[in-house]
Structures are given as C-alpha cells and as structure tokens.
C-alpha cells in the first residue's frame, strides 16, 4: 500500500544520482571484462614477447632426473600398494 503523500518529482530527483552511479559502475565493469577477455585470447605472454621466442634458461640446481622409463621390476624402484 502506497503512502498518500507520494511526490514523484521529488523521488525522481532523489534517485537520479544513485542510478547514474550504478550505471557508470556497470559500464566500468563491462569495459574491464572486455579488457580481461581480450587478454585471454592474446597470443603474447605477459612479458610482451611473441610466440616462438627463445625459451628461458633456468640455472642448474644440482638435481638430475633419471633418464628412460621405469618399470616395477627395475632395481631401486619402490612400488607402493594401498
């Protein structure tokens, strides 16, 4: 039930600023989302180098990985069974 002393012009004036601010926020979020989506489909990485550039050389940490494939019967291979 509406109050009997409703002044529509006064209500329009009071609600104009919040509605404009909400519209600006929605537009800003839309622009940010488009920028984000454009970044997802951009083939360049974050450093700005293009695909096909030289790989990054990592320093040797003194750890060597075993070469070849390992089977359960190989010496030095422990198989955990639950």
Image (tube, rainbow, N blue to C red):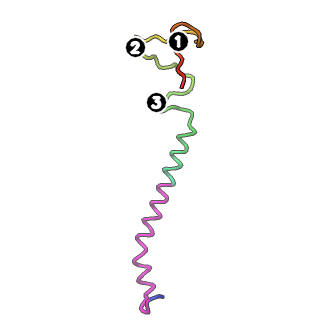
Quick one: 4 or 66, which is closer to the camera?
66
Name which residue lies at 52% across and 20% down.
Answer: 80
Alpha carbon distance from label 2 to label 3 = 24 Å
Work out whether mark 3 precedes mark 1 in sequence or the reverse, and give the earlier one.
Answer: 3
Quick one: 65 or 71, which is closer to the camera?
71
Q: Mark 2: give few (<14), some (14-19) or many (20+) Cα within 10 Å.
A: few
Alpha carbon distance from label 1 to label 2 = 23 Å
Residue under pointer 1:
77
Alpha carbon distance from label 3 to label 1 = 41 Å
Q: Which residues are magenta?
A: 3-29
Residue under pointer 3:
47
Work out whether mark 1 precedes mark 2 in sequence or the reverse, and give the earlier one.
Answer: 2
Contact (Cβ within 8 Å) of mark 1 with mark 2 = no
Comparing labels 1 and 2, the label whose residue is closer to the camera: 1
Residue under pointer 2:
61
Give the SS element for disc 1: loop
Residue 70 percent location from the top left of the image: 58, 12
In this rendering, position of residue 81 left or right of residue 12: right
Q: Mark 3: give few (<14), some (14-19) or many (20+) Cα within 10 Å.
A: few
Name which residue lies at 43% across and 17% down.
Answer: 58
């Amino acid at each position: 039930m509406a109050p009997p002393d409703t002044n529509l012009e006064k209500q329009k004036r009071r609600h104009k600023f919040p509605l404009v601010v909400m519209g600006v926020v929605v537009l800003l979020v839309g622009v940010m989302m488009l920028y984000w989506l454009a970044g997802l489909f951009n083939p360049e990485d974050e450093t700005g180098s293009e695909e096909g550039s030289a790989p990054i050389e990592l320093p040797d940490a003194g750890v060597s990985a075993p070469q070849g494939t390992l089977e359960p019967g190989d010496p030095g291979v422990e198989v955990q069974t639950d």
